[in-house]
Amino acid sequence: MAPPVFCPLVALWAARGRNVRVAIDLHSGGLNDPSWRWSFGIMRWAIRQAATVIVTNPDLLEEQNIGHTPVQIIQDPFWIEDEIEIGSVLPSRLPYAVFPASGAPDEPIHAVVEAAALLSGQVDLVVTGEQSVRPDTPGLRLTGFIPAKEFRGLMAHAAVVLALTTREATMQRAAYESLQVRRPLVCSDTRVLRRVLMDAAVFVENNGPSIAAGIMEAVARADELRAAGEARQVLIRAEAEQGLAAVRALVTGQTAMVTDE
């Protein structure tokens, strides 16, 4: 799995002179996160040496010199856990939208805070992860990092889930998690998110007024968005199964070394 670039480099070194093929599970940060910019050239070289590269979206590899390495499009398999353990959440006076965040630099947290103030008294905004914002904004609740069961409960009882990023060519784990618990989605208006989610989300600009308006639209269209999300799950799963079949075919009858999650 990459980044970091060290993982595929170690796998490629270990595979030298052996009947072993390496598949790289490339996450978007490997080629578009500024903190890994120094390693982009090395990453492209590693991909060219690999038997295949796995990505959640093809945009990440556009205009990248990866030679003739086959590309497999495989979304995160969120459908595997059909029966997930969901914790309870504290009762809330208002419906709430949850932004599953980690404090990463591509998360438009200040726009979310602005949206919380605009929606105060109508919809609360709950933000996870460690955040460097004032916790006393009206309508905003910061949870920090929370246990998985509690997090799933927070998601499952949300009126809306936000999947927001300021980077193109970046799929959002929050979108997968929202589909898993069948919640209405509000997403940043990027090419990848539009192509993958289509009519299963409301798309917004990364500013407070647009996010606030998107949340209210998603609340109003909740049933429609949930139905569209279920239909998208079927298509995403079918596409991923094709990619998994290609990877299985690659390693059939051989010793395989796959760098994956």
Image: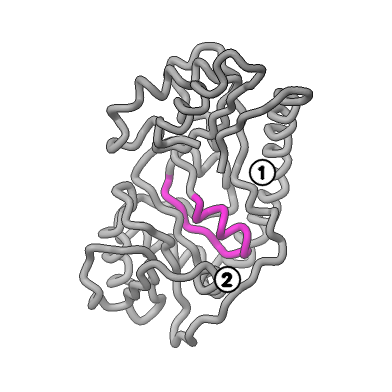
Q: Is residue 115 left or right of residue 215?
A: left
The amino acid on which the numbered mark 2 sits, given as a three-letter code, is: Ala
Q: CA distance from mark 1 to mark 2?
A: 21 Å
Locate residue 244: give its quadrant. Answer: top right
Q: Element at badge 1?
A: helix
> Is 133 in the magenta?
no
Q: Count the marks.
A: 2
Looking at the image, is mark 1 or mark 2 earlier in the sequence? 2
Q: Residue at x 51, y 81 (%)?
A: 89
Q: Residues within 10 Å of mark 2 (few under 14, many from 20)?
A: many
| Residue wearing tag 1 | 236
In the image, what residue occupies the spot 42% across and 36% down?
Answer: 3
Q: Which residue is mark 2?
A: 156
Left or right of 230? Residue 96 is: left
Figure quadrant of residue 183 = bottom right
Q: How is the image coloured?
A: one colour
* Residue range corresponding to the magenta coloring: 173-189
Q: Secondary structure at mark 2?
A: helix
